[in-house]
Image: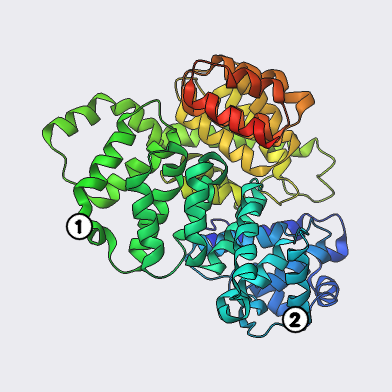
């Protein structure tokens, strides 16, 4: 497990690392842990199975993840979140007993009743209903029940952030294409709140999801949405066995769309990342004029692809490793016998900072988040980035901020704040800092968020600042943006004010 490459290998590494660094020696010892785990399972596992699970040679399920969370004393759904994300990233369908649900038992009837009463459901409850909806759509076919289920599911999606967003994505995937018409309307009216839900369509089967993504790409120009629909569109075309040939009849439209996004340096940089990957994947033939334009923004394209050179990467990773070792040795988290050089950690950091593809960087950061030492790791990484990375190397800066954001630890927010208060070379760094502060607090982040909004040079950043201000309930910042000269950001801020 020194170099876990595939997403599910990374998940197995995570589970093993959590147990290896647990404060309870009975948890570290496989036989006693197995006994504790079996108390939360209907099946009975043996120590040999635990070893196979944690080496990546046996399959986890949602139920096994839930049992692990209870036996390890973790927050609910932390491992479920990672397992779902890793499975989908690897092209696998997550395993769960709910997938075999074909009849509405008393449990499902109660859930439907609670939904009708306006109660909030937990993710496992939503997922259970989604499997029932997929397997037996006739049981939920009455228009009132069906519409309530689909609309309230999307209400839940629009109110989610980070971990909750990823969990509700799985519910959307399981529900299937029936949710797409409603999702399309939500994206049209509230794109910044719903843009991440586009990813779900890339994992749905059938032509409807592919057509949804294609029409969305060519019919709606919004950088936030573009950032999360081009990768699912590629995924959908690959899954259907078509690849780039699947868009042959609209190839010129897709090329023009991607080039316009990539050429607009004020657009969401995440959209430009995906546009660049889409162009490379589609092997589009560029005219001499188009090639000349791409050459003129060559340095910016290198930042999008994180072209930094192997020696630079090695030096930065070595510095992070040394800093993390020092911080760990001084931390109360390091008990007797705790290794300061932990196998596999470098793989997560390297991929989280330097992988050319956005989805690979996100996977690395999401799959190390629940580890007990990830907050400390984030603090160490953030200190090195804020001190050692030149502001002109803004591609690495924003990759680091995104890595820290996914960790969802208070310690990881401190270096993000430090970067936000410094002189920022590129507005895309302000954007990722502004997004991260949506998980902060009004007391700590009001003034910084206001500063980011006032110094932003692009509409994309102002829109993100508005959304984070709404998440933190900071009406004065929204009111400032709502009366600003940026008409697009002002309209977004006014809409968010109406929802407060």
- Measured from the top left, where is residue 398 in percent x and y? 52, 31
Residue tagged 2: 45
- Measured from the top left, where is residue 177 in percent x and y? 47, 66
Residue closest to the eye, 28 or 288: 288
- Measured from the top left, where is residue 48 in percent x and y? 70, 79
Q: Secondary structure at mark 2?
A: loop
Image quarter for residue 437? top right
Q: Is residue 355 visible?
A: no
Binning the other alpha carbons within 10 Å of mark 2 as few (below 14), some (14 to 19) or many (20 upward) gives: some
Residue tagged 1: 248
Residue closest to the eye, 33 or 270: 270
Residue closest to the eye, 229 or 175: 175
Q: Residue at x 76, y 27 (%)?
A: 442
Q: Is residue 17 above or below residue 221?
A: below
Image quarter for residue 16? bottom right
Q: Earlier in the sequence, mark 2 or mark 1?
A: 2
């Amino acid at each position: 497990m020194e170099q876990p490459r595939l997403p599910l290998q990374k998940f197995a590494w995570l589970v093993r690392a959590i147990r290896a660094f647990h404060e309870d020696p009975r948890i570290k010892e496989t036989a006693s842990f197995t006994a504790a785990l079996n108390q939360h399972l209907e099946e009975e596992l043996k120590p040999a199975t635990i070893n196979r699970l944690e080496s990546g040679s046996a399959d986890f399920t949602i139920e096994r993840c839930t049992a692990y969370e209870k036996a390890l004393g973790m927050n609910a759904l932390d491992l479920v979140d990672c397992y779902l994300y890793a499975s989908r990233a690897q092209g696998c369908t997550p395993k769960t007993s709910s997938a075999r649900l074909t009849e509405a038992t008393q449990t499902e009837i109660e859930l439907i009743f609670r939904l009708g009463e306006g109660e909030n459901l937990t993710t496992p409850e939503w997922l259970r209903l989604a499997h029932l909806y997929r397997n037996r759509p006739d049981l939920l076919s009455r228009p009132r029940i069906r519409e309530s289920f689909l609309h309230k599911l999307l209400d839940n999606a629009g109110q989610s952030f980070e971990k909750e967003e990823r969990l509700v994505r799985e519910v959307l995937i399981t529900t299937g294409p029936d949710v797409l018409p409603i999702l399309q309307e939500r994206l049209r009216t509230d794109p910044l709140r719903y843009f991440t839900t586009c990813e779900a369509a890339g994992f749905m089967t059938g032509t409807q999801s592919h057509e949804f993504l294609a029409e969305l790409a060519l019919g709606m120009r919004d950088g936030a949405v573009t950032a999360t629909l081009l990768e699912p569109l590629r995924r959908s075309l690959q899954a259907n066995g078509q690849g780039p040939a699947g868009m042959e009849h609209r190839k010129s439209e897709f090329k023009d769309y991607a080039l316009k996004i990539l050429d607009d340096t004020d657009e969401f940089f995440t959209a430009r990342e995906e546009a660049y990957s889409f162009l490379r994947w589609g092997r589009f033939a560029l005219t001499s004029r188009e090639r000349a334009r791409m050459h003129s923004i060559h340095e910016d394209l290198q930042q999008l692809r994180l072209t930094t050179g192997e020696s630079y990467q090695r030096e930065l990773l070595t510095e992070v490793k040394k800093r993390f070792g020092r911080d760990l040795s001084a931390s109360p988290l390091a008990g007797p016998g705790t290794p300061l050089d932990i196998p596999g950690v470098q793989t997560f950091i390297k991929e989280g900072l330097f992988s050319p593809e956005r989805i690979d960087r996100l996977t690395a950061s999401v799959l190390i988040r629940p580890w007990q030492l990830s907050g400390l790791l984030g603090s160490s990484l953030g200190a090195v980035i804020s001190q050692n990375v030149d502001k002109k190397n803004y591609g690495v800066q924003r990759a680091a901020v995104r890595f820290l954001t996914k960790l969802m630890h208070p310690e990881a927010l401190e270096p993000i704040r430090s970067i936000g208060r410094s002189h920022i070379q590129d507005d895309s760094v302000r954007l990722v800092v502004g997004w991260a502060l949506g998980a902060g607090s009004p007391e700590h982040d009001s003034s910084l968020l206001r500063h980011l909004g006032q110094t932003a040079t692009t509409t994309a950043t102002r829109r993100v600042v508005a959304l984070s201000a709404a998440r933190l309930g900071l009406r004065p910042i929204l009111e400032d943006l709502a009366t600003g000269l940026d008409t697009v950001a002002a309209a977004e801020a006014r809409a968010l004010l109406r929802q407060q």
